[in-house]
Image (tube, grey):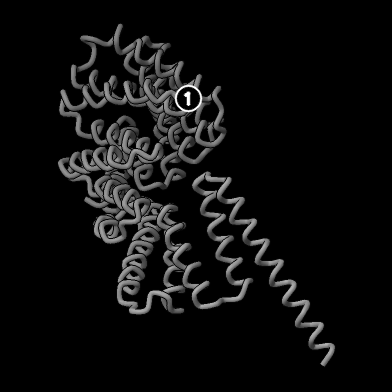
Amino acid sequence: MTSTKEIKHLQKAKSKAQSSNNLKEEASLCNQLGEVYAKTGDYHSAIEEHRQELKLSEILHDVIGSAVANRKIGECYAELGNIKAALKHQRLHLNLARSVHDAAEEQRALATIGRTYLFLFDSDNSRDSLKHAEDAFKKSLAIVDERLEGTVSPRELSEMKARLLLNLGCVYDGMKEPQRCSDFIRQSIYIAEKNNLLEDLYRANFNLGSIHFRNGQHSRAMRCFEQSKECARKMKDKFSESECFHSIGKVLLYLGDFAAARRSLKKAFCLGSQQPSDREAVKRDFKHAIRGCQLEQMATEVTDKFSHEAMDLSEQLGDLYCKVGCYNKALEAYQAQLVCAEVLGKPARELAVIHVSLAATYTDLRQHHRAVEQYRQELKLREVADVRDMNNIMLFNLI
C-alpha cells in the first residue's frame, strides 16, 4: 500500500472512531497517521496527529500513551531542526516513563534524547553535544543490561542493544575515536546478524560504509554498502535499496569510474527515493555519471591528441572530475589540457587560467606546496601577458 492510500485508509478509520466516540482507538489511529506522515517527510502534519494523540491520552489518563505521543512529537521537531522543542517533549516522555516505573519506556526515552543530541552535533559540531549523547546512550544501555531481561522479548532486547551500540559508535566517530567507533558498530552488526535483525543490520552496515567512505577507505565502504543493500532487498524496502545503490554510485564517481557509477545510479533512480531532496541528489549524480561516460567516449574518438577538441574535452573532464570529488583524475585532465594548450601555442592568459584550475585542485587534495607553485606559474604568465599588452598599446600609439 502506498503512503497516500495508507493515509486515506487511516483517516477513514479515524473518522469512524470519532463517530463512535472510541477515544482509545482514535488515539491509536492518530499515532499511526503521525508515523506515516513522518515517514513521508511531512513532519508538521505528523506533529498535529501526535498532538491529538497526546490530548486523547491525557483524557484517558493513559500515562504511557502520553509519554509515547511526546516522544513522537519530539522526534518530528528534531527532524525539523527545532532541537529545543524536541528535547522539551523528549524529557516529558522520560519523566512520564519514570513516574510509572516503566523501564522499557525509560530506556526508549534516553535513547531518543541521545539521538537528538547527535542531530544537534550535526549542526553545532560541539563536543558537549556528543558528551550529552554518550551519557544518554550509556544510561539507556545500562537499563537494557540490568533491568529489562524478562520484561521484554529477547528479540526486542537484542534490537535495543544493537541500536544503542550503533549510536555509541556514531558518537565515537564524532569524537574522532576510530577504534572505539569501529568496535561498537561491529558489536551492533554481530548482534543484528546473530538475531536476524535485518533493519538494524542494514542501518549498521550503511553507517559503517559512510564512515569508511569519508575516511577514504573505498573498498571497505563498498563492501558495507553491498551488505546493507542485500538487507534492504530481503526486507523488500526499495527506498533503502535505492539509498544503497546511490551510495555505491557516489563511491564509484569519487573513484572516477563513470560507467560503473551510471549503472548503480540508474538502479537508484529507477527504485525511487522517499524524500524529494534525495530524489534530486540521485538525479544530479546520475547526470554527472552520464555526462562522464559521454565525455570519455568522445575523448577516445579524437584522432589528434593535441587538437582544440582534445583540449576542450580535457577541460570538461577536469571540471566534472572536480564536481564528483575525483581530484587525482581531475589533475590528469587539466595537465593534458595544459600540454595541448602549449602545443597549440595558446596565449599566456589562457595558460594562466589552466594553472589556476591545477592550483585549486591541488588545494582540494591538500597539497598546498604544489598549489602555491601553480599560482606562481599563473602570476608569471599574467606578467608576460601584461608586458605584451603594454607593448602592443605602445606600438599602436606609435602608428
* Front position in the image: 295 or 276: 295
Q: Residue 278: x percent and y percent?
A: 38, 52
At 40% from the left edge and 37% from the top edge, which residue is drawn?
A: 215
Mark 1 closeness class: few <14, some 14–19, many ≥20 residues within 10 Å:
some
Kind of residue at disc 1: Met
At 69% from the left edge and 72% from the top edge, which residue is drawn?
A: 385
Residue behind mark 1: 175
* Front position in the image: 13 or 82: 82
Q: Is residue 260 above or below residue 345?
A: above
Q: Quadrant of the C terminus?
A: bottom right
Residue that extends furthest to the bottom in the rendered view of this protein: 399
Q: In this view, does 64 lie above or below 231?
A: above
* Front position in the image: 142 or 57: 142
Quadrant of residue 395 within the rendered picture: bottom right
Q: Residue 40: x percent and y percent?
A: 36, 48
Secondary structure state at the residue bearing disc 1: loop
At 40% from the left edge and 58% from the top edge, which residue is drawn?
A: 280
Q: Is residue 375 above or below residue 16?
A: below
Q: Residue 125: x percent and y percent?
A: 55, 32
Q: Residue 98: x percent and y percent?
A: 41, 12
Residue 59 can be seen in this image: no
